[in-house]
Image (spheres, helix red, strand yellow):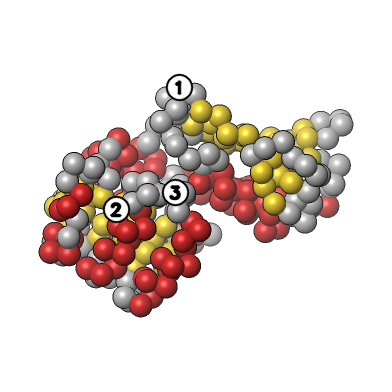
Amino acid sequence: MKIALIGYGKMGKEIEQIALSRGHSVVLKIDIQNQDELTAPNLGKADVAIEFTGPETAVDNYFKCFEAGVPVVSGSTGWLEQKPEVEKACSVNQGCFFYSSNFSLGMNIFFAMNKFLAKIMNDFPQYDISMTEVHHTQKLDAPSGTAISLAEDILSVNDLKTNWTITSPQSDNQLYIKPVREGVVPGIHTIKYDSEVDFIEITHSAYNRKGLAYGAVLAAEYCVGRKGIFSMTDLLNF
C-alpha cells in the first residue's frame, strides 16, 4: 500500500514507522514547509492518505483528497462543525473518508465501555457524571476530540445530562469536562460517577502515540478499495 502522509509532525513520523514495519511505503509527505505539494498529481501516487494536521487545514485537505479520488483517513480534531459539508463532498466525489477522534484500539474499547456504563447509570440519578482529560501542553484544542466523543456518547444514552461544558456547570443536567494541559502527557481520559456514598471511575491512559499510529494504519488498510464514510466502529465491528 502506498501512503500519502498529510501532517509530518510527531504523529506523522510515528505512523510512518508503523506503516513501514507492515510492508507499506510512504510516497508523499506534507508538512507546513511544503503544503504547495499537496496536489492531485502527487496524491494520485498514493493508494490512501493519512491526515493528522489541525482544524485550520484539515477540511481543505479532505477536499483535495476527495477531488483526487484518494481515500483519506483522518484524526484531526476541532473541525466537526463542518462535518455535514465534508460528508457531502465525500458523497459527491464518491470518495472514502475514515474519521476517528482517536484511533487507539484500547480507547475504542473504552468508548464501548463508556457508553455501556452510561446507559446503566441512567437509572441512578444519585450519581453525578463528570470527566477529566489530560494532554500535553502542545495540544491546542480543549476539550480534546476524544473527550467530546466520550461526552456525546454519554449524552446519547443517558437522560440525566443534556449537554456538556468546560466551564462551571450552571445546572445539574450539564456534563462537566475538565481539560488539563501539562507536561508531555499523551492522553488520559477519566469518567467519574460520584454520589454521597461512593464513586465509580473508569480511565484510559495512553503511554505513547504508537497505539494511535497503529490504529490509523489499520484504518488505511481498511479503506483501500472502499467508498463511503467509516469509523473505528466499522473497522472493529463492535
Q: CA separation, marks 2 and 1?
A: 27 Å
Q: Nearer the viewer, residue 155 or 38?
A: 38
- Residue under numbered circle 2: 50
**How many numbered discs sit on the rendered protein?**
3
Name the foreground residue: 88 vs 158: 88
User: Which quarter of the figure has residue 201?
Assistant: top right
For mark 1, does the 10 Å Cα neighbourhood hold few (<14), some (14 to 19), or many (20 or more) residues? few
Q: Is residue 201 visible?
A: yes
Read off the residue under disc 3. Answer: 77
Say which quadrant the N terminus sits in: bottom left
Helix, strand or loop at label 1? It is loop
Task: Name which residue type carries label 1.
Answer: Gly
Sequence-wise first label, 2 or 3: 2
Counting residues from the N terminus, which is met first, the one under dot 1 or under dot 3?
3
In x, y percent, where is residue 20? 19, 45
Chain-order first, disc 2 or disc 1? 2
- In the figure, is residue 46 to the left or right of 66? left
Q: Which mark is residue 183?
A: 1
Q: Is residue 54 above or below residue 92?
A: above
**Residue ID at (51%, 28%):** 181
Residues under labels 1 and 3: Cα distance?
A: 20 Å
The one of 3 and 86 positioned closer to us in this rendering: 86
Q: Is residue 116 visible?
A: no
* The label number, if any, that marks residue 156 in the structure image: none
Residue type pointed to by label 3: Thr
Counting other residues with Cα less than 10 Å from the Cα at mark 3, is it few (<14), some (14-19), or many (20 or more)? many
The residue lying at 46 percent from left, 49 percent from top is: 78
Q: CA distance from mark 2 to mark 3?
A: 14 Å
Q: From the top left corner, tell me how far across and down residue 221 is, in percent.
A: 29, 58
